[in-house]
Structure formats: structure tokens, C-alpha cells
Amino acid sequence: MSTLTPEQYIAKIQGQIQKLKDVQKNLNIDILDLHSRHAQSIFGDGLEGESYSTEEILVGGTVFGKTTKFGTLNYSFVTEKGKNKYFGSKKKRKAQEWVTLSTPKGMRRLMELKGGYKELREADGRQTNNVDLNRTGILFRDYLSSIKKVDGGWVSGVTKEENVGKLEGAIARYGEKLAIKQSLLDEFNKKFVGAMLEILK
């Protein structure tokens, strides 16, 4: 076995360091791809076996997803199509059932939507075949762009305060169905093992 010169030894070490950097770069790309596909499975493909609520809700004209001090959730329509279906004319507004509530800011009239959140989505022209956690797109975009590398690892979630409660509520309601699919993990683990073998060559 021949002895390496100092120059050859340094060149070998530098080559190994570069190989490690290349492997790490590729793994980072794979992690970002995994995160993107996980987000798509939740916000695009939807959650298997879940359906939108048909429990009656109260609907306002401007506020979405905010909780008032008296604890009533008020929803508004995202699209003009949805809004116009119920609020588009005096005749349409009059035809609806209304409830008047006393709030810290005074009296407020809200429409009773008998078909619940599912009807709200249908009015806006959204799909209701499965739960996809995507209505305005705000939560989806926040989650998709939130992944960061921290202390050698990766973390994801949401960064906007308005989305924290939405995500926590989804986790509380759907639990493990929001986890990364095993098929995606298996695919990533295969790439990871390959990368480790490449380093050890």
C-alpha cells in the first residue's frame, strides 16, 4: 500500500468534504420536495374519510374565521359568487333567516346557514368531496413557505399569527391524518440511505 504525500492526502480530504457538501445539498432539495408533496396531500388531495360539517353556522358579510368575545364564529364568503347568492339583492337577503345578537360593539345581524360550512364552500364554488383545509389559500401558502433549517434540522408549521389557531384546530380535529404519508417517508428514506452510502464510498 503506497503512502500518500501531504498534497495527495489534503486533496483526498477536500474531495470527501466536497462530496459531503454535494450530498447534503441534494438531501436539502429532497426535504423541500417532501414538504411540498406533504402540503399537496393535505391542501390539494384532501384527507381520506373526512367530510365538511353540515351543522348550522352563522354567516356575516365581511368577517371570516374570527372569534368574537361572545364566542360565536362568524363566516363570510370568499368569492363574489358566494356572497351574491345570499347577499346579492334585497330580495335575496330578505329570503334568508336571520338572527340578531348583542355584542360588545352593539347589535349584529347574522344569517343562519342551515347547510353549515359545506354549504358555505359550495356557494363559493369550492369542492366538497373531501376535506382539503384550503379555502382562501392563506393557510396553504403560509404552511408551504414556512419550512426552515434550524440547528442542522428542519422545522415547518406556520409563521402568520392568523394561521396558528387554524392549524392547531386542524391538528386537534384530524390528528394523524395530517401526518406525512408513509409512502412519502419510505421514498425519502430510500434516498437518504443512498446518500449515506455515497458518503462512505
Image: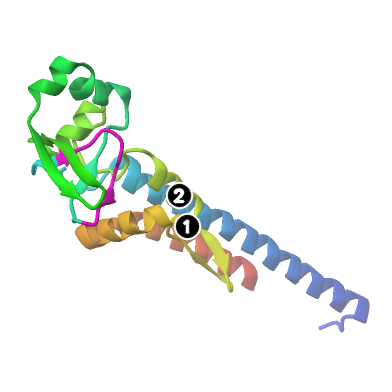
Q: Does residue 16 appear left or right of residue 10 in this picture?
A: left
Q: Does residue 195 appear left or right of residue 104 in this picture?
A: right
Amino acid type, label 1: Thr
Q: Nearer the viewer, residue 174 or 200?
A: 174
Q: Earlier in the sequence, mark 2 or mark 1?
A: 2
Identify the residue under disc 1: 159
Residue 149 higher or lower than 87, as above or below:
below
**Label 1 Cα crowd, 10 Å radius (few <14 / some 14-19 / many 20+):** some
Residue 14 higher or lower than 168, as above or below:
below
| Percent coordinates x, y for residue 56 in the rendering | 8, 41
| Percent coordinates x, y for residue 124 in the rendering | 26, 28
Q: Is residue 64 magenta?
A: yes
Q: Is residue 181 magenta?
A: no
- Residues under numbered marks 2 and 1 in contact, where contact means CB atoms less than 8 Å apart: yes
* The C terminus: image quadrant: bottom right
Residue 76 higher or lower than 53, as above or below:
above
Residue segment shown in magenta = 58-69
Identify the residue under disc 2: 142
Write down the quadrant of residue 13 in the picture.
bottom right
